Structure formats: structure tokens, C-alpha cells
Amino acid sequence: MSVPTDTAPRGGYPAQLLAVSWRALVQLVRSPSHSRRAEAARRLARHSLWLSAAGAALVIVLMVGFDQTEILLMPPRGTPSLWPIRILTDFGKDEYVLSVLGAALVALAFVAAGMHGSRRALLLGFGTRLQFMFLSVAVSAFVAEILKYLIGRGRPFVGGQANPFNFIPFEGTGAYASLPSGHAVAAFALAFAVSALWPRLRLFMFTYAIVILLTRLALLAHHPSDVVAGALVGMVGAMAVRYWFAARRLGFAIRADGTIVPLSGTVSDRLKRVARGASAP
């Protein structure tokens, strides 16, 4: 969410709520302005290409040599003792993740509309980061849904056999929506997004993502290649959203070599630097 330049709100609370919401939307679609965005775009393209190539190769290897073996080792679907895993896996469900992030954005807008000055600026700076996390998951999940429909891979034992090559493209039902794993997409997109903003949380977030990945295998919801593909889609999607934000100077800075890094310091510190005539990153 953008930082307003006025120090005191104008108009009543409804007007301020509308203004906060409008700025939050407008900042996402404004023209990119960062002078180093070309370097960042080249770096994104290079890293995405290498990651996609390595991920695709791993997916093929798993599909040919490991998927069938792994799902035969798992307990039968519906095993009563798996109830803790069925609860745990929902922490990676994209609808739930997006609902929590969306609710946080709405609550933040309502609170920020009643504030002004540096307190509003600080809160809206955090709102921009929430927008980044929300869109990282949402964009990745949207791409995953398209891929699921196009690929049409059957989930483990759909059709009665442990057949990793059970494909019906454009089938469009949940039974044939195994590749990529939506839970893995959401978990790894969220893990990448949070780690991009707060690098110290990287170990915790990717541990969370791997746990979600393993729950999908234990529940026979996916093949190993499905969750690897989901992790790939989630990370590449979040990388693309990070570039979108950085190119518009939202939450991220771009170094001379095209590396995208989170903005350092609080939003209020940044406002003070700008007020003193310092250049924005």
C-alpha cells in the first residue's frame, strides 16, 4: 500500500478508507519507474529459465523412476491414524492462505483509515508487503489451476492402479488435477515471499513448505513429481511478482547487478530520508 504524503487525513473516515483502498490498488498498476528494472528483468529471466529447466528434468526423472514406487509405500487413503496429517495439510491450502492474507489486508485498511502521519505510513508500508505475499500466492495458484486443466494428470490410484502416466488433458475434475500440487504451489510461493521480505525467516518458512509437501505424499493426494512441480511453479510465480513490485519501488530495491533485495529500515525512516532530499532506491 502506498504512503500518503499528507500528514493529517482529509474528510471523514469513509473518505479515508476509500483513499487508502484506492492507493493500494493504483500503486500496483502504475508504470514501472526503477532505473535498474532492465537488469532485474534479465536476472529474473535467467534464474527462472535455469530453475524451470532443472525442475522439469527432476519432474521427468521422478515420474519415470520413483512416483509409482513411492505411492505404493504410503498407507492406504483414509487410514484413521493419518488424521493429524489431514489437519496439518490444510495449512498449505491456497484458499485458506489467501483468505488469511486477504483478511489481514482488509483489517489493515480499516485500521489505517483511522490513522495519520508516520503511524499510517508505517502501517501502509506493511500493507505493501502483505500485498506482495497475497499476490505471490494468488498469481502462482492461478497459473497452477491452468496447468492442472491442461495436463489432466490423475491422482494416485485414480482408475484403480498405481499408474503415474494416467493423463486425460482438459478433463477438468479434481481426480485429474494432480500436476502440479496446489498445496505445494501455495506453500512454496508463501515461503519464497516471506523469505524475500525477511531473510531471517527463510529456514522456518521453507521447513513449513517441505512439511506441507510431505503431507500431500502421505495422504496419497499427489505423486512426488506433482509436489516438485508445485514447488517450482510457486517459487517462479513469487519471483515474477517480486520483480513487479521492485520495478515500481514497492517493498524492494534493485542493486546495480539486478539483484532484488528488501528495502532496509522502517517506512518512517524512509520517509525521513526522502524529506531530507535523499534519493529513493
Image: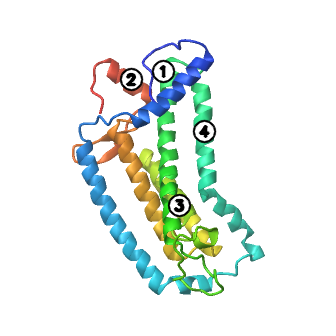
Q: In this orientation, does residue 207 appear?
A: no
The residue singled out by tag 3 in the image is 145
Placement of 256 over or under 157, stated as above or below: above
Instruction: State if disc 1 and disc 2 touch (CB < 8 Å).
Output: yes
Placement of 29 over or under 39, stated as above or below: above
Q: In this orientation, does residue 117 appear?
A: yes
Instruction: State if disc 4 and disc 1 touch (CB < 8 Å).
Output: no
Q: Nearer the viewer, mark 3 or mark 4?
A: 3
Which callout, 3 or 2, points at the residue further toward the start of the chain?
A: 3
SS for callout 1: helix
Label 2, label 1: how far apart the Cα atoms are:
8 Å
Q: Residue at x 47, y 43 (%)?
A: 132
The residue singled out by tag 4 in the image is 104
Q: Residue at x 28, y 48 (%)?
A: 259
Label 1, label 3: how far apart the Cα atoms are:
41 Å
Mark 1 residue crowding within 10 angstroms, few (<14) / some (14–19) / many (20+): some
Instruction: State if disc 4 and disc 3 touch (CB < 8 Å).
Output: no
Q: Is residue 25 left or right of residue 175?
A: left
Circle 4: residue type: Ala
Circle 2: residue type: Leu
The residue singled out by tag 2 in the image is 271
The mark tally for this picture is: 4
Q: Quadrant of residue 57?
A: bottom left
Circle 3: residue type: Glu
